[in-house]
Amino acid sequence: MRAIVCKAFKGIEDLSFAEIAEPRPAANEVLVDVHAASVSYMDYLMSCGGYQMRPALPYVPGTDAAGIVLACGDRVTRFRPGDRVSCGNWFGAFAERMVARESSVALLPANVDFTVGSTVLHTYLTAWYALIERARLQAGETVLVTGAAGGVGLACVEMAHLMGARVIAVVGSAAKATMVRAHGAAEIVDHSREDVRERVKALAGDKGLDICVDNIGGALFATLARFMGWNGRLLPIGFTSGEIPSLAMNLPLLKNYSVVGVFVGAWMERCPEQAARATEAVMAWVGEGKLRPQVDRVLPLQCAGEAMSLVANRRAMGRIVLQVRQDL
C-alpha cells in the first residue's frame, strides 16, 4: 500500500511517499480502508521527535482518518466489514490502510462524508475530555480558548458554546476572528493587534475566567493564569509556542483554582468504554449539525509534508485533510 513514511525524527524533511506492507488488525482492532486523513499539530510534533512518545522508526504519521472497515479482530463486536467509520490512533493514518482500537472508532452518520469524518475524533474528543470530563463545564460559565482557530481550539469553542458557555476566543488574525465567531465565540481577542493582557482583563472582569483552555503555552499561559476566577479551572492542552511554561503556585492558591491536565490519548487507553461512549455522542452531534467541523483545505496524500508545515506555522483554520481515495 502507499503511505507517507517517517524514517527519522527530523520533521517534514525526512518524510517520503512509498510502498509499504499493509498492517494487520489485532484482536481488539479494526482495519480501515482510508479515504481521508486529517492533519494535526501532534502529527508534526511527533515527526520532529518532540512529542511525549516516539514510535519505532520507520513509522507512518497521522492520528485521524475516515474510511470503510475491511476487517475486524476476533474481539471486535461493534463493527463489521463495510461500515463507514471515523477512526484514530497514535499514528498510521497517512496511508491507504490503518488499524485502530475498537474504542477509537465511530460509525459515520449517513450525512457525514469522509472528508469531514476524518476531522472529528482527535479534535472533538479532546474538547469533550477537557470541558466535560476534566473541567465539568456548566452553562453560563466563561470559557477562554487560546489557539481558537486551530482544530482542537475550534472544537473547544464549538463545544463550550453548545453547552451554554460564554466563549472568549484568542486568535492571531482578523480572518480567524471572523471564523471563530461564526462557530460560537462571543468575544474575540486578536493578539496580532491587541494587548492580550489588557483585553482579557477587561473581558474577564472582577469575576475572572471560570475555565481557560490553553493550546499555546509559553508567556501566554503565564499571562492568563493571572485572570482565573475563584474555583476556576486552568487546562493546559498543548504547547504550540514551543515553550512549556512554569506557574507561580501562589496564583492558584489565592484564587482556589485548579490546574487540570488534559491528555486525551492516555484517557482513551485507560478508559476505553468511557471514550467509546464519548465518541458516539460526539459523532451524533456532528450528524445532527450541532457541531460543524471546519475543513481548511483538501490536499493529496503525497502533500502531507506541506500540510504539516501549514499547521506548524499556524496557517490553517480548522483542519487540513489529505485525500487518500479519489471517491471523496
Image: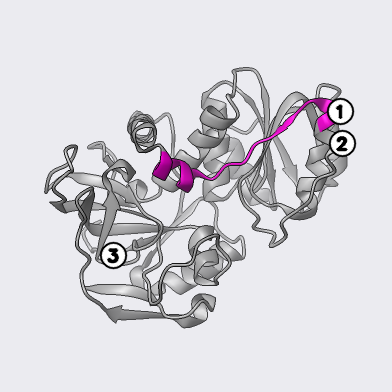
Residue at image location 55% in from the left, 58% down from the top = 316
Residue toward you, 315 or 265 = 265
Few, some or many residues within 10 Å of mark 2 (<14, 14–19, 20+): few
Location of residue 263 with respect to 167 vertically, above or below:
below
Q: Which residue is mark 3?
A: 324
- Quadrant of the rendered image containing residue 205: top right
| Coordinates of residue 239 in the picture (x, y in percent) | 65, 55
The reply to whether dot 1 and dot 3 touch (C-beta < 8 Å) is no
Residue toward you, 111 or 269 = 269
Location of residue 230 with respect to 196 vertically, above or below:
above
Q: Which mark is residue 311?
A: none
Instruction: Residue 268: say if magenta.
Output: yes
Of callouts 3 and 2, the N-terminal one? 2
Q: Which residue is mark 1?
A: 254
Q: Which residue is mark 2?
A: 250
Q: Is residue 159 visible?
A: yes
Cα distance in 3D space between marks 3 and 2: 50 Å
Cα distance in 3D space between marks 1 and 3: 52 Å
Location of residue 227 with respect to 31 vertically, above or below:
above
What secondary structure is found at the residue carrying circle 2? helix
Amino acid type shown at disc 2: Asn
Q: Which residues are magenta?
A: 253-270
Foreground mark, 1 or 3? 1
Amino acid type shown at disc 3: Val
